[in-house]
């Protein structure tokens, strides 16, 4: 087993003998075998044990065993105690989730404190097979069928190449005992049901079932690399990430448009079920929105617009005089200044408005648009509803919500900010002073 683990570590570039690593030690067979094998292979390791106080005397028994085991190996041991039930109640999460959060938060802190390069945990091949089956039952894409990966977010799994039976045989050969968690034999949790009920049934159908599942998961890891490269290229065609815009026609021209849409939107918190709804309604009524916990998708003619889901903030800022003003709802500023019109100053920059200062009365107001807003677009006769103007400009609903206008003391629109000034306040040959407004 040591030879197989050493080869797996080398093949996957998991560990470096010049670095220090933490081993998560529970006292069970898997973690004991992990610490013992890494120590025998010559790696610089320190152990960490978490007492979650969930099994009464059994939890304290496990901690005492870890202390004795590490003393025998001359391995430094770091210990921590958690009130797991209180943490779960306070954060309104399951006990299992609470224990996971507490454990991995502690490992991250300890890793930083002692300068370790990673945390080694004792997942083995059987755990990976269970993960594949669980993901298959719950519903999953390609990634869920790969099983547990050897490295993820600083967590390293050197034993994924061996089975639980091989681990137990290794410990018997070494004459090394370990503790047993009594809850592992209970069938209350889904993973234990898979381990104790489903996998034995599969082995009745085919004694090599677990080996075959693990092999398939390994093949899918390689397949995923090919798929990821293809998806990356298709994303570049379909998705303008900077603008958050998905071109629906280009999406439909790809070989698997629904799956490609999922690959784009999963990073924005959308589930496969939500993506299916979005896909089915991609040619639906413009303005329809779909929400995840963090993001929005808007159907906008021949596009899907993806944006962060943020609380809508309204702008209403009074500008009493010339000066530089910070816009609270944006990372930008507005500079107001009066200049001479000696050179017939007229701005061609969309972020600079030049207006006839003689016709403008302070205080100015910078605000969001409101229903019924009208203005006289520069270069045109008569007035238009601002909503019609924005529709003609093909603004989506998010852009309309964010659009600001600058008005005078009488609430007359001077400038649709970043878009167009009002024709009534244009600079002419008779203008003596220009009010220049710059969006910075």
Image (spheres, grey):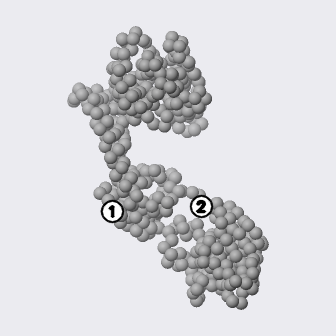
Residue at which label 1 appears: 252
Residue 158 is drawn in which quadrant?
A: top left
* Distance from Cα at disc 2 to Cα at disc 1: 32 Å
Residue 171 got which mark? Answer: none
Q: Position of residue 122 (x, y in %)?
A: 43, 26
Along the polypeptide, which appears first: circle 2 or circle 1?
A: 1
- x and y percentages locating residue 177 in the rendered image: 43, 12
Q: Indicate whether 398 appears above or below 140.
A: below
Question: Can you say which quadrant of the picture contains the N terminus?
Answer: top left
Q: Count neighbours of disc 1 (C-alpha within 10 A) and say few if under 14, some if 14 to 19, many if 20 or more.
A: some
Q: Does residue 54 show up?
A: no
Give the structural element (helix, strand or loop) at label 2: loop
- Crowd around label 2: few <14 · some 14–19 · many ≥20 (10 Å): few
Toward the left, the furthest residue is: 205
Q: Between label 2 and label 1, give the one nearer the viewer.
A: 1
- Can residue 378 be seen at all in this image of the molecule? yes
In depth, the one of 360 and 409 nearer the eye is: 360
Residue at the spot x=36%, y=48% of the render? 228
Check the picture and name the quadrant holding the C terminus. bottom right
* Residue positioned 49% across, 34% down in the render: 154
Q: Is residue 176 left or right of residue 82?
A: left
User: Mark 1 falls on what kind of element?
Assistant: helix
* Residue sitting nearer the eye, 321 or 234: 234
Q: Which residue is mark 2?
A: 312
Q: What is the quadrant of residue 210 in the picture? A: top left
Residue 236 x/y as whole percent: 40, 58
Can you say whether 79 is above or below 72 in the image? Answer: below
């Amino acid at each position: 087993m040591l030879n197989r683990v050493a080869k797996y570590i080398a093949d996957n570039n998991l560990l470096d003998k010049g670095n220090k690593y933490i081993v998560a030690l529970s006292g069970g067979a898997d973690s004991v075998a992990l610490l013992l094998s890494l120590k025998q292979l010559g790696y610089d390791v320190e152990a960490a044990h978490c007492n979650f106080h969930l099994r009464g005397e059994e939890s304290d028994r496990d901690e005492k065993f870890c202390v004795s085991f590490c003393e025998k190996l001359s391995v430094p041991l770091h210990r921590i105690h958690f009130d797991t039930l209180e943490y779960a109640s306070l954060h309104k999460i399951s006990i299992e989730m609470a224990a996971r959060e507490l454990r991995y938060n502690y490992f991250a802190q300890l890793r930083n404190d002692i300068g370790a390069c990673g945390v080694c945990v004792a997942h083995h091949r059987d755990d990976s097979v269970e993960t594949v089956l669980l993901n298959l039952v719950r519903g999953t894409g390609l990634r869920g069928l790969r099983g547990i990966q050897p490295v993820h977010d600083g967590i390293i799994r050197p034993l994924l190449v061996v089975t639980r039976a091989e681990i137990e045989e290794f410990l018997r050969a070494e004459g090394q005992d370990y503790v047993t968690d009594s809850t592992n034999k209970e069938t209350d949790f889904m993973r234990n049901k898979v381990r104790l009920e489903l996998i034995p049934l599969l082995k009745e159908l085919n004694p090599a079932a677990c080996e075959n599942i693990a092999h398939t998961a390994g093949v899918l890891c390689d397949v995923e690399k090919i798929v990821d490269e293809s998806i990356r290229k298709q994303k570049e065609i379909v998705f303008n990430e900077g603008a958050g815009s998905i071109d629906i026609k280009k999406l439909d021209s790809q070989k698997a448009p629904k799956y490609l849409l999922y690959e784009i939107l999963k990073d924005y918190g959308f589930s496969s079920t939500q993506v299916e709804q979005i896909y089915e309604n991609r040619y639906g009524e413009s303005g329809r929105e779909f929400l995840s916990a963090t993001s929005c998708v808007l159907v906008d003619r021949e596009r899907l617009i993806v944006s962060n889901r943020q609380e809508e903030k309204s702008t209403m800022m009074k500008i009493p005089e010339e000066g530089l003003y910070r816009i609270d709802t944006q990372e930008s500023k507005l500079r107001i200044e009066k200049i001479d019109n000696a050179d017939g100053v007229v701005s061609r920059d969309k972020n600079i408005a030049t207006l006839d200062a003689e016709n403008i009365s302070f205080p100015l107001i910078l605000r969001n648009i409101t229903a019924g807003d009208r203005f006289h677009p520069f270069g045109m006769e008569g007035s238009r509803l601002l909503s019609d103007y924005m529709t003609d400009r093909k603004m989506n609903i998010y852009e309309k919500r964010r659009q600001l206008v600058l008005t005078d003391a009488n609430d007359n629109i001077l400038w649709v900010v970043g878009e167009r000034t009002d024709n009534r306040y244009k600079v002419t040959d008779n203008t003596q002073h220009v009010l220049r407004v710059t969006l910075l």
